[in-house]
Image (tube, rainbow, N blue to C red):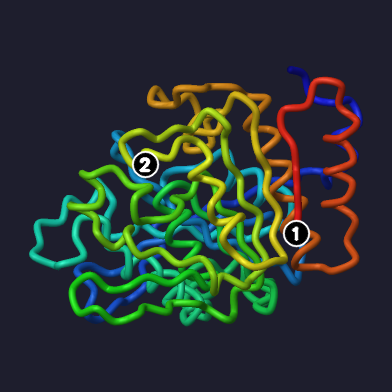
Amino acid sequence: MGEPTHAADTVSAPTAVLSVSPVVLPAPGRAVDLQVRVSAPVTGTELPIILLSHGQGYSNNLSSLNGYAPLANFWAAHGFVVIQPTHLSSRTLSLDTDDPEAPLYWRSRAEDMTRILDQLDAIEAAVPQLLGRLNRSKVAVAGHSMGGHTASLLLGARLTDPYDGTEVNLAEPRIKAGVLLAAPGRGGDALTESVAQNYSFFSTTDFSHMTTPALVVAGDKDTSTHLTVAGADWHTDPYLLSPGPKSLLTLFDAEHGLGGISGYDVAETTDENPERVAAVQRLTWAYLRTELYPGDSAWQAACDALAADPNPFGRVESK
């Protein structure tokens, strides 16, 4: 499945990238201070921002600011500032805590992103090459797997706190668009018994308030049997069960790693496919360009290129 010869026309020319880590942000009340990686093009001004939330997995460093280089580097090389936190759920922290939200820290993960937006001045001070170059009105969030759950909460999805029964609304109005990559779907009878018992916050996920524009990316072979009994379609729920405007990119033959987005040559990627990763890079970049800059033709051009490919890697639908 080769890359269409005209696909490059949909993406801006890459530039060199600078990456700085760890940038440490004070976080009173958090178990540890918040560490982030900042990746940015070495040139350009008025740069839009992507907050990238890592997933969970067997590897130690993928679930931290050190993961997802295939996405972070591509987005930064094409004009975005990418900020990646190490959430409290990261294996690199190995927290021994009685926090009722452990081990996945669903609320803290979303709060990390709000904390980052609150401390952009501190980030600029720590990375002087960025000083005055951020466009703070152009902010997106992206996340893979559990990171997709985090992103969905910031985009407006809600749940019921399993410990006090209150409705949780962590929507962040400064975030204008999102990308959900292999994100969890609905709760209830769609969950495995183990997930329903051990991670009960998944049980009440409600996408009906997720009004911020988003691109949902799902693999049609991503059955995630450790999480759901609903099959691969479960990962399309954030698109199907939320109000528009939304788009859905379904990747043919893709499993949970979507070809290998979590890192270069990652052994736990069950569907390694560099062309698929390149497709995810292009399409997500194009979507965010157009959502953050209305009138930009990148998304339409990317969709046209996909439609014209005689051997398409996936399909796009929108509402």
Where residue 228 is drawn, which disc sits there?
Answer: 2
Which amino acid lies under the numbered mark 2 shown in the image of this protein?
Thr
Nearer the N terminus, badge 1 or badge 2? 2
Q: In front: 159, or 174?
A: 159
- Residue under circle 1? 319
Which amino acid lies under the numbered mark 1 shown in the image of this protein?
Lys
Q: In front: 135, or 214?
A: 214
Give the CA distance from mark 1 to mark 2.
25 Å
- Tell me the quarter of the picture where residue 238 sits: bottom right
What SS does tag 1 mark? loop
Q: In front: 51, or 13?
A: 51
Label 1 neighbourhood size at 10 Å, few (<14), some (14-19), many (20+)? few
Where residue 131 is drawn, which disc sits there?
Answer: none
What SS does tag 2 mark? loop
Q: Position of residue 226 (x, y in %)?
A: 31, 36
Q: Residue furthest front?
A: 189
* Drawn side of residue 211 relative to residue 172, left or right: right
Q: Position of residue 255 (x, y in %)?
A: 50, 29
Q: In front: 199, or 102?
A: 199
Label 2 neighbourhood size at 10 Å, few (<14), some (14-19), many (20+)? many
Picture residue at 43% right of the left edge, 61% below the top: 150
* Drawn side of residue 199 relative to residue 41, left or right: left
Position of the C terminus, as image quadrant, is: bottom right
Q: Is residue 107 above or below residue 29?
A: above
Q: Position of residue 98 (x, y in %)?
A: 8, 65
* Label 1 with label 2: CB-CB less than 8 Å: no
Picture residue at 64% right of the left edge, 33% below the top: 251
Q: Position of residue 281 (x, y in %)?
A: 67, 41
